[in-house]
């Protein structure tokens, strides 16, 4: 609020504001909600000019950000041209079914946008924000999403094959039956956060998940075959019914608090098995070579476990 207006208000005196009523309506809405309503570029220029004159720096910045806000028609026009949507504000827009293939979306704001069945194949979306967006059935194949935010996004059935999601935050999102597959690490999540995601029946086969956090995640019945879980945190995760064939689990953390029914075919060297309960778990084909199982619970009721090369206590209490 301008200093002279605030001073008169504190003194209980009426304040006179010399301003076009149409501009003042924008100012009042901003003061009430913290957001500017949609308006023409000329109107926003008038609001910014008044904000500059009265020293309202936050309102100045809000006007500047609004100049970057697009509508659906403008997005379509830009996609027919240079495809450069970097830094643009597309929050809450209905972009469902639209083709954004190859678009430059670096630092773009797509919070709560509707991108159902849209295609963004090959797009560059580093540091973009898709938080709360509806990405159901969307195609993100080959998209670069380094450090992107997909917090709380709904992406059931979406395709992320060969996408780069290093450092991205997908926390709390829904990715049921989503496809993140990528042979030889073509799909990468290094250092990403997938805490509390619902990724039931998703396909992570061949994905590179090094140092990724799956704390509290639901991965039940997901395909994790040949995925690289190096130093990944699965604390409290639901891994029931997953396919671990050929998965690399070196240095995995939090397995003691995770829910799982099998480790079939997994490569388990260096996994922290302290306090892990393997009772009744199907370990057929799992490779325990070089693994410390001295603190494992119910090891001798594990199904099909080949302990060759592992360190463990036998049923007589003899350490091997």
Image (cartoon, rainbow, N blue to C red):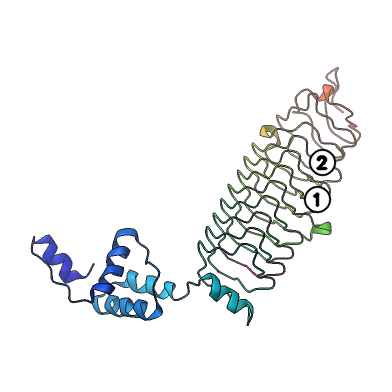
Magenta residues span 120-128
Visible residue check, residue 134: yes
- Residue for point 11% across, 66% down: 8
- Mark 1 residue element: loop
| Mark sitting earlier along the chain (2/1) | 1
Q: Quadrant of residue 188?
A: bottom right
Identify the residue under disc 2: 243
Above or below, comparing residue 283 to residue 119 in the picture: above
Q: Quadrant of residue 51?
A: bottom left
Quadrant location of the C terminus? top right
Pointers 2 and 1 in contact (C-beta within 8 Å): yes
Q: Position of residue 205 (x, y in %)?
A: 80, 50
Q: Is residue 122 magenta?
A: yes
Q: Nearer the viewer, residue 248 or 40?
A: 40
Label 1 crowd (10 A; few <14 / some 14-19 / many >=20): many
- Residue for point 85% across, 18% down: 315
| Secondary structure character of the magenta stretch overall | loop
- Residue for point 23% across, 73% down: 21
Q: Position of residue 100 (x, y in %)?
A: 65, 70
Q: Is residue 70 left or right of residue 155?
A: left
Quadrant location of the N terminus? bottom left
Cα–Cα gap, marks 2 and 1: 9 Å
Identify the residue under disc 1: 205
Q: Nearer the viewer, residue 47 or 51?
A: 47
Q: Nearer the viewer, residue 158 or 57?
A: 158
């Amino acid at each position: 609020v301008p200093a002279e207006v605030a001073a008169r208000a504190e003194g209980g005196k009426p304040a006179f504001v010399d301003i076009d009523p149409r501009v003042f309506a924008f100012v009042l809405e901003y003061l009430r909600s913290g957001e500017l309503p949609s308006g023409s570029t000329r109107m926003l220029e008038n609001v910014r000019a008044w904000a500059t004159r009265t020293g309202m720096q936050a309102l100045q910045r809000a006007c500047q950000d609004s100049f970057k806000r697009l509508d659906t028609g403008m997005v379509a026009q830009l996609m027919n041209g240079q495809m450069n949507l970097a830094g643009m504000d597309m929050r809450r827009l209905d972009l469902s079914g639209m083709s954004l293939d190859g678009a430059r979306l670096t630092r773009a704001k797509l919070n709560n946008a509707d991108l159902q069945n849209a295609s963004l194949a090959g797009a560059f979306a580093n540091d973009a924000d898709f938080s709360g967006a509806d990405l159901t059935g969307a195609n993100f194949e080959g998209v670069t999403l380094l450090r992107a935010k997909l917090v709380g996004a709904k992406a059931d059935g979406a395709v992320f094959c060969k996408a780069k999601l290093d450092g991205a935050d997908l926390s709390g999102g829904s990715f049921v039956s989503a496809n993140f597959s990528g042979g030889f690490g073509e799909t990468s999540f290094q250092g990403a956060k997938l805490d509390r995601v619902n990724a039931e029946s998703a396909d992570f086969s061949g994905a590179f998940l090094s140092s990724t956090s799956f704390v509290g995640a639901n991965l039940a019945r997901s395909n994790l075959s040949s995925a690289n879980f190096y130093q990944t945190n699965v604390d409290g995760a639901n891994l029931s019914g997953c396919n671990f064939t050929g998965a690399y689990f070196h240095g995995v953390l939090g397995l003691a608090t995770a829910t799982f029914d099998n480790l079939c075919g997994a490569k388990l060297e260096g996994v922290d098995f302290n306090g892990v309960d393997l009772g009744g778990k199907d370990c057929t084909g799992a490779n325990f070579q070089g693994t410390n199982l001295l603190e494992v619970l119910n090891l001798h009721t594990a199904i099909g476990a080949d302990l060759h090369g592992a360190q463990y206590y036998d049923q007589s209490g003899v350490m091997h």
